[in-house]
Amino acid sequence: MPEVSDSQNPLLDAQEIASPSGRRTDQDIYRAIANAIFEQRLPSATKLPEDSLGDIFSVSRTVVRKALFRLASEKLVDIRPNRGAMVASPTVEEARDVFESRRIVEAASVEAAMQRMTDDGRARLERLVFKDHAAHQERSRRHWIRYSGAFHLEIAEIAGNQVLKAFLKELIGRTSLIIGLYEPMQRTVCTYDEHQTLLDAMIGGDIAHGVRTMVDHLVDCEQRLGLERRDRDIDLRAIFADGGD
């Protein structure tokens, strides 16, 4: 199976991101932080001090601040007065809203992609499923997160709607935060075999079936997070009724 080149992968490593001049820009910093969030290298609530980031990337605080404000506009970072910036921590309600939005956006994405599918587009999706599978086999969490997100974004790329793709990229970033917060231990929310099933449905040519398969996939991903269990009020008196034994 052919390799997926970095130019084909919309989620790049931070060290690969730099302007042609070699000097970091606010866009470079934005992409580096966003990719670290997408790949769950930056957990929710991680503080993002401007001075520390400026030292890391050898840029001024002004450059860092511009990147952080863009991340905040995409709900990936929270900026609080007198407390600075930190990686966002989505609530259960926000998590549900994100998955609902993804079902709407990605249903449209699949429909358009199936109408525009080419042999090249199919090959790109197949390569990403292969990479996703390999990452699971290697137990490389960072890489399966990368290729899982890249698979969904590639469908949007094939669909040909750049506004839709940009919106989906924001939602995928927020999904990474949600998974990092709520994913049960030893369980994978988004699995490569479901991506293979989705790809098979898209190649089959039945648009209604392809859309339904994508929606079902995202419903399953949300349900595996167990968000309904986290919505319950916790009765501390009942929990410690036996004295904590």
Image (cartoon, helix red, strand yellow):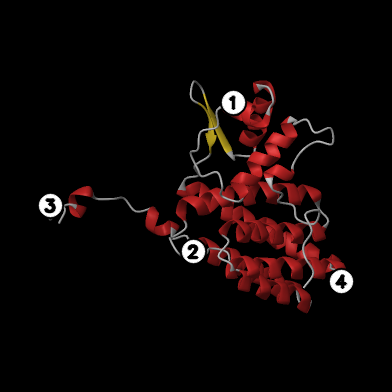
Q: Earlier in the sequence, mark 4 or mark 1?
A: 1
Instruction: Indicate the amino acid at tag 1.
Output: Glu
Q: Name the residue at the left extreme.
A: 243
Q: Does the CB distance between marks 2 and 1 fall below 8 Å?
A: no
Element under disc 3: loop
Q: Earlier in the sequence, mark 3 or mark 2?
A: 2
Residue 119 got which mark? 4
Q: Residue 33: name its quadrant.
A: top right
Q: Position of residue 236 (x, y in %)?
A: 22, 48
- Mark 2 to mark 1: distance in Å? 37 Å
Q: Position of residue 83 (x, y in %)?
A: 48, 25
Task: Give the foreground label among 1 and 3.
Answer: 1
Q: Earlier in the sequence, mark 2 or mark 1?
A: 1
Q: Does the CB distance between marks 3 and 4 fall below 8 Å?
A: no
Task: Tell me: 37 left or right of 118.
Answer: left
Q: Position of residue 220 (x, y in %)?
A: 54, 67
Question: Disc 2 designates what residue?
Answer: 223
Task: Tell me: 169 left or right of 21.
Answer: left
Instruction: Indicate the amino acid at tag 2.
Output: Gln
Decide which of 102, 21 is in the foreground and name it.
21
- Mark 1 to mark 3: distance in Å? 46 Å
Residue 244 got which mark? none
Question: Disc 3 designates what residue?
Answer: 243
Question: Disc 1 designates what residue?
Answer: 50
Task: Give the foreground label among 2 and 1.
Answer: 1
The answer to whether one can see residue 118 in this image is no
- Mark 3 to mark 2: distance in Å? 33 Å
Instruction: Indicate the amino acid at tag 3.
Output: Gly
What is the crowding at mark 1: few (fewer than 14 residues within 10 Å), some, or many (at least 20)?
Answer: some
Task: Give the foreground label among 3 and 2.
Answer: 3
- Vertically, is 178 above or below 77? below
Instruction: Indicate the amino acid at tag 4.
Output: Asp
